[in-house]
Image (cartoon, rainbow, N blue to C red):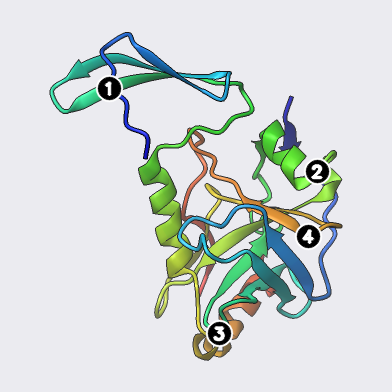
Amino acid sequence: MLILTRKPEQSIIIADDIVVTVLAVDGDRVKLGIKAPVDISVLRDEVRREVGGENRRAAYSPADRAKMEGMLRTLIRDP
Amino acid sequence: MSTTLAPSTPAETVLQRTAVRFIAGMPGLEEYRAFTLVPVDGGPVYWLECDEEPAIALPVAEAFAVAPQYAFDLYTSDSRALGITEPADALVLVVLAVPPGRGTITANLFAPIVVNRSAGRAKQIILDGSKHSLRHPVGER
């Protein structure tokens, strides 16, 4: 991992067109400004983790699948 | 410019087993890229079975079949990476959550899986900043 030290108002530039600026540091909170092309997705890590938790909970083994098919069919009949 | 995916997108149910290849691993399942979409009674509900790990299959549904009001914009970077040039190229799936025992089945509208229908290329898109729910109710058990 690349580790850089920045002060408020200092920035780093990623791949020519993404600029991450430290706007303010207040105790344990760091306010970042991110300037990136509109088609670049910027995500907070915990949001991705939350989706990952949902995905893992939705992953079923073959034994469970047979039991669930009846339930899935209720959605087909009554979407 | 972005591509808006909405129910007006012609729905064409996938009736056969279809190979799906993730261009980026799904969150929580990053190590797996190769899946097969297996219809339950011809759709719009499917098992998304992991080819590399038989113990993993996710119940998914065609998004617009279970959530007729659903719509979102696809980032240009994602539509380009998936090879989607118009809405009809995309099959939009949502992961279902089934409660143990009785309860409400929910769909993850916050993180839809967008599949290029002809190429099978797929990505789970996280709609951060949107109001779409991680657990949108779609049916009673």
Residues tagged by mark 4 and mark 2 found on one chain of the structure: yes
Asked which secondary structure carries label 2, the reply is loop
Cβ atoms under marks 3 and 4 closer than 8 Å: no
Type of amino acid at the residue the image marks with label 3: Arg
Badge 2 crowding class, 10 Å Cα cut-off, few under 14, some 14 to 19, many 20 or more, is many
Mark 1 and mark 4: Cα distance apart in space = 43 Å
x%, y% of residue A76? 69, 72
Q: Please tell me the numbered disc located at residue A54.
A: none
Cβ atoms under marks 4 and 2 closer than 8 Å: no
Mark 3 and mark 2: Cα distance apart in space = 32 Å
Q: Please tell me the numbered disc located at residue A5.
A: 1
Asked which secondary structure carries label 1, the reply is loop
Asked which secondary structure carries label 4, the reply is loop
Q: Is residue B79 above or below residue B45?
A: above
- Left/right of residue A47 with respect to residue A72 in the rendered view: left
> Badge 3 is on which residue?
A65
- Left/right of residue B52 with respect to residue B80 in the rendered view: left
Mark 2 and mark 1: Cα distance apart in space = 40 Å
**Which image quarter is the N terminus of chain B in?**
top right
Mark before the other along the chain sequence, 3 or 1: 1
Front: mark 3 or 1: 1
x%, y% of residue A77? 70, 74
Front: mark 2 or 1: 1
> Badge 4 is on which residue?
B120
Residues tagged by mark 2 and mark 1 found on one chain of the structure: no
Cβ atoms under marks 2 and 1 closer than 8 Å: no
> The residue marked by circle 1 belongs to what chain?
A
